Amino acid sequence: MGFKTRIDAAWKAWLLFPALALVGLQACQDGVSNESVQETSITTSTYNGPAARTSDIQGFRISVWEPLRAQNRCGACHGAGGQAPLFVREDDVNQAYEAVNPFINRVEPDESALVTKVANGHNCWEASDSACATIIANYVQSWLGDGSGGGRQIELEAPPENVVGESKVFPDDATLFAIHVHPLLTEYCSECHVDDAASPQSPYFANADADSAYAAVKTSIDLDTPRNSRLVQRLIELHNCWDDCPGNAQEMQSAITRMADAISPTPVDPDLVVSYALSLPEGTVASGGSRQENDVIALYEFKTGEGNVAYDTSGVDPAINLSLSGDMGWVEGWGLEFRDGKAQGSTNDSQKLAQLIQATGEYTIEAWVVPANVTQEGPARIISYSAGTDDRNFTLGQTLYTYNFLHRSSTTDGNGEPAHSTSDGDEDLQATEQHVVATFDPEHGRRIYVNGVFTDDEDETAPGNLNDWDDTYALVLGNEASSDRPWAGKVRLLAIHNRALNEQQILQNFEAGVGEKYFLLFNVSGLVNLPQSYIVFEVSQYDNYSYMFRQPKFISLDAGVVPGDIPIQGMRIGINGKEAAIGQAYARLDTSLNAAEYSQNGQLLSRIATVIASEKGAEGDQFFLTFERLGDYTHVFTEPEPLPLASPADAEPRSEVGLRTFDEINASMAELTGVSQTLSTVQETYTTIRQQLPSSEDVNGFLSSHQVAVSQLAIEYCSALVDDTGLRAGFFPGLDFSINANDISSATWQSQVVAPLMSRFMGENLASQPDPALVEGELMDLLTGSAGLARCTGQCAADRTEKATKAACASLLGSAVVLLQ
Amino acid sequence: MSVTRPPSGPGSALKLITFGLALLCAAPVQSGPREQAKRIHDRIAGVPPSAEVLDQMVSEIEANDPLAAAMLAIENPNFYNVTLKNWATPWTNEEMTPFAPLNDYSATVIGMVRDEVPFNELLSADILYVGSNAPAYSNDNNAHYEAMENQGLNLKEELLRTTQSGVTGLPPEGTAGVITTRAAARAFFVDGTNRAMFSFTMLNHLCRDLEQIKDPTRPHDRVRQDVARSPGGDSRVFFNNCVGCHAGMEPLTQAYAYYDYVYPEEDMEAGHISYTPGEVQHKYLINSSVFKDGFATPDNHWDNYWRKGVNAALGWDTSLPGSGDGAKSQGQELANSHAFAECQVTKAFEAICLRPPVDSADRSKIGEITTNFKSGYNMKRVFAETAVYCAGD
């Protein structure tokens, strides 16, 4: 990494200090404190000693010696005449250089004794040893450089040789499960997690049959750590609790604990082909990497992992250390999680942002974030340099699926509006870990990059200047300074640069990743019969609940070793004595370790990464690898036998009859009346009411709206039948429609209208149809009863005979004799 | 012709409907051959039989050959125009509505049943059914089939068997039965990531919602880059809700890597299927930064991880390799499973018996019909056998 610009920024910060002191008593903004969390200013004197003899010494002077020689840094003890080593002696930087060299690891600057000594508790000037160590590590990296060459070579170290430990395994017999856990499952989970549920949800651990439930539940129970059981965790996540979730989770955990307590730990399966075991801290630290940080002026990596202060480890003083308040916490593997809280710096310390950014006229807000959801708005403040809801220099916020970038300039107002946002439709913001970068420069204005890629949203506001920035505001994360625009999510890294990073630099930082990473070297020397041979994974704490394993490769630390053609198949990751149930991405690995693919950096085995659930936390979890085949060693992986499908219990008897549905009704009416479905009047009506007709055969779903639609359609078909003289002559042979309805005898109505209708629509001699006498009675009552349609006072209207016939037809056609099947 | 509406009054149609319902629901009746024949016809054709057909069916039943009676009902055109069309239409759209118009997917199902084409070719054959009506089949719209439906054409007579490769221009190796019909592409290859095609095929043709076949223990190596491993920063969501489906689904869905449905902007109905052999569709590679160390699809090679684990119970055909390239061989894998056969029988059962199987007698019958079905995969016979079973005692 080139360090000149960054150190320039540091120098600017020191020059700035007297000015900060002058404004230190400015009035507080709304919710903004001007008090520093820690004393972060430094005091140095002018150097009058000999000039640096080499460029390396000059680099040491600028990057390490100057910031550390202050009296409130290392200069208090390790200056001239003080305690050895005199690496910050102020009389001669060349001698200081000679003194520091034994304590510098040029291959791994992070591992320099100068860093580790402080990390282990040696006179840190901050409250956190890790914060001081990070700052010094950054100084050393600035001196030696770690990024300009595209990444440095990690020096892998041989880990301790731990034999895989023992763990509890499930007994073959389901008795313990049936006694302790199964009753809870059958009582509370059987509405869904049984294979014959109305909407069955796998796994079927609540089946009434304990054996099948036991076979299904094993991946949901953790015998070594009952609380980590998915049965417990799902209740903690509020998944269908039966009353009080925490109480239910405790009840489930207790039941699993009773079951687990009755099981003795067993050693790892002796038939497995296993590597040696490792925990995460036993790996080689892979932090650092090739980030572009030449112009960083505030940096938060959140390595502390505890306490109420998040430290600015940019090394650019004054550090804007952030006070944590409200509902929030630390993320394992580095980061802060905001629920309804904030992390805020003082206005005094935050002044360096305004001063250093105004000096360049451009800047970058770079962060690794994990929005908790895509429903928050406001914008919800992720990172803000502001005083309240109406006053800011800049803010990176969230509104649903978009990132918002508010920024004060000569072309925007004091609230940074109009805001620049990513396109709604693109949904650039997702509720997953994202690298988001917001840049401003006078040429391009505001730009937002997500995961290393420009979102293609151009700033519609002309770029202005930053002359109106207010240096009395505070840097705040996770909320507004006034605490009324909370953002839910995680920030795993924040870097503020006083230059606009270009696309290549942004991509470089995205690819450098985030968080604490280790190389875990699983010893397989004995299996491949080659010295110092390992399968190496890059492992990081992915979130509070899992680890990410990536980039598996084979390597020997013995430079003389080159593998022959050694087969490697079916690699699985083990945790705490057993193979992880979920997350085996290398189970289908089938390749060989060979000289052609092997180099001094090893042989990459897969480009796929996977996540493995955490059980006991990073300190307690022990990992190992198993192989179906490695070299001459083999172990046939056997899948558990598929569960025999239990016969579901008998359901309630269902009706033997059902409704005809829409097309069936239409086709039936056409078939029975002889009227074509494509007759325009019929087709128009059917098209109109089609979706109002029953679509399900279930008689219990029959609605009054269905009745109305059926009647409409029946009337349409019967009208068409009676209006068509040819059709009606065939259907009602002998009936003279010109005779007045009143003059047609009941016997004629019965024999020439009712009888043909019943015969055709109901069929004959069918016990499954209604009693013909009853149907005939109803129809005759309709026609010739006391209020019968065919009976009028005096003469009926001339068309009454047709109408009465249509009515009788429609009454029967639209009735259950046709509608039911 | 003018429509004359009859007068309404207290004794009108609604009263009689209610009356009839009450009568029929009041007490079950003993079914003789006539009642059985009537029900068989009602259920198969969706319409009542004519007196003549009813008599013929009664004769067959009395001659102890109820299957022959059912086959008579199957001759009714409404078996094709109504029963089969409404049976298949919900499979052809994402909303699963039966009210969608006839299309090349549903027409092909109807034709395959009519012609007794082995139904296990449903997801793999180079097959298509069209009519002779205007407008002709088009890759860019459904007008041909909608005209067929609007004109009330007799599908039993009108549908002509042809090939997709001959009509749509897909190469024969790019065809996969109804999967590569225009209607299926419109519904399930449109936008998205093509996972919809797989999940709906599983639902419609293996009768399994993905929720029912979750197996988080399958290897994760094919889960694509667009799947977050820690949604909202909580990987438990991935472990509990995501990976159970994705682990097994992804290596099977890879078979569709060369398919898309492309359409003009603002007119999704005017699109056509796109097939790009050798070139993975962009949709398989979108959102790659969500988990950049996830699987990047290089080709259309598929593997069935569910042949092991709990989903081995789906009954995969051991004579098939369980892996291959493209939708055709994947369709064979799915359609030769026991679950596919059982699903078709169960769907027919529900369509004919108007209810799901409820007891051991029903399940036993479905098992028996499934066994028969797997010998020749004659779907028409499944309808007939089922109708006989549900004809009543």
Image: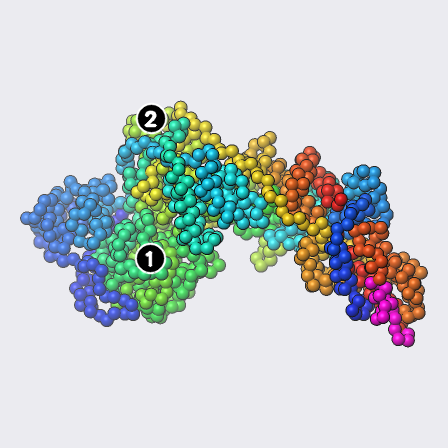
- List x then y, in percent, for residue A597: 38, 31
Chain letter for mark 2: A
Q: Residue at x 79, y 66 (%)?
A: B12
Name the chain under label 1: A
**Image side of residue A592 versus residue B263, left or right:** left
Q: Give residue A167's position: percent from left, percent from top.
A: 37, 35
Q: Main secondary structure of the magenta part?
A: loop
Mark 1 vs mark 2, CA separation in Å: 47 Å
Q: Is residue A779 magenta?
A: yes
Q: Residues within 10 Å of mark 2 (few under 14, many from 20)?
A: some
> In the current view of this chain or complex, which residue is farthest to the bottom?
A794
Q: Amino acid at mark 2?
A: Gly
Q: Which residues are magenta?
A: A778-795
Identify which residue, A284 or A233, lies in the foreground: A233
Q: Is residue A482 magenta?
A: no
* Drawn side of residue A493 relative to residue A428, left or right: left
Could you tell me which secondary element the residue under label 1 belongs to? strand
Q: Which residue is mark 2?
A: A526
Regarding residue B258, the answer to whether it shows in the image is: no
Which class describes the residues within 10 Å of circle 1: few (<14), some (14-19), or many (20+)? some
